[in-house]
Amino acid sequence: MVNKKVYEQISREIEKINERLKDTKHKVVILSVKGGVGKSFITANLAVALARSNKKVGVFDVDVHGPSIPRALGVVNKSIIRGIDGFLPVKGPLGIKIISIGLMLPGEESAVIWRGPLKAAYMRQVLANVSWGELDYLLLDMPPGTGDEQITIAQLIKGIDGILLVTNPSVLSEKVALKAKEFASKLKLEILGVIENMSHFKCSDGKVYYLFGKGGGRRLSEEVNAPLIASVPIEPYVAETMDSGEPLLIKYPESEASKEIEKIARYIIKRLEG
């Protein structure tokens, strides 16, 4: 009887989640199989690039243990509040709507020590009660790996358009490819493309240095049978903007990294909107 009641409650929450998202046109998972590849930097700046293309954008920071989106989008001093119709996302630059556990905690240093079932319950309850309004794009910024959070999101949200796979040249492409392909296949999600972050460093004299190796993104794209959308270079501005909360595309729109991220936005718009 208890199990039946729990199942019925979860089913109601899933229905409510997808009712909440009925005015969201496209949902895209941003995934990295390994940590340390700059996935949240890509997510935050892709959100800005889409918003600059006159798209209504939301970001759900799925990472419970290390939420990075609030700082990356400069909203660490804001909090999610409850309105008449549910939780109201915090608004970031260009009207980007943001939901993150980092906006519900007392401070950035606060730790969340939860196991799988608690994380799943948190995601169900939050998503079932967020008032997103109309969105052209909802970016789902996953924690590294292919574990509980990633599986839960794929099971809760219907109509996910696909996965953007973020990597860097040093990640062993074969192992990443196998994990990414298995994850996408089991959850019936398409890998839309590969983004190689920290691809290279360009010196002031014009010389290009491949600090983490060369060609990893290309090999990964071939192994997962998805295009390499962009190769985002290492730039000194990146750490500065992540710390300050002013996205690269806003503070340094003419940088090479910004232009590569704009390529991702153009690709996604063309791929999903035709």
Image (cartoon, grey):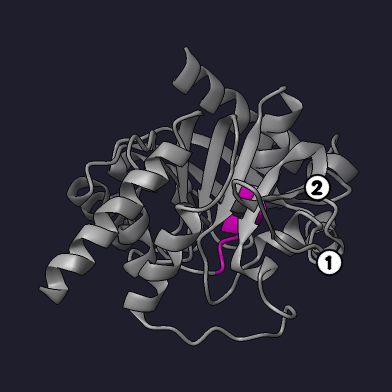
Q: In this view of the protein, which residue sits in the foreground, 36 or 96?
A: 96
Q: Position of residue 64 (x, y in %)?
A: 52, 72
The numbered mark, 2 or 1, whose residue comes first in the sequence reads 1
Disc number at residue 248? Answer: 2
Viewer-nearest of labels 2 and 1?
Answer: 1
Q: Of the residues shown, which amino acid type is indicated by label 1?
A: Asn
When asked about the image quadrant of residue 261, the answer is top right
Q: Secondary structure at mark 1?
A: loop
> In this picture, is 62 found above or below 249?
below
Is residue 78 something that shows in the picture? yes
Q: Secondary structure at mark 2?
A: helix
Label 1 Cα crowd, 10 Å radius (few <14 / some 14-19 / many 20+): few
Q: Which residues are magenta?
A: 36-43
Q: Of the residues shown, which amino acid type is indicated by label 2?
A: Leu
Q: Which residue is mark 1?
A: 77
Q: Position of residue 267 (x, y in %)?
A: 54, 25
Is residue 1 rendered to the left or right of residue 92? left
Q: Is residue 41 magenta?
A: yes
Label 2 Cα crowd, 10 Å radius (few <14 / some 14-19 / many 20+): many
Q: Position of residue 166 (x, y in %)?
A: 49, 51
Is residue 257 rendered to the left or right of residue 130? right
Q: In this view of the protein, which residue sits in the foreground, 246 or 148?
A: 148
When asked about the image quadrant of residue 171, the answer is bottom left
> In this picture, is 48 found above or below 111?
above
> In this picture, is 107 found above or below 173?
below
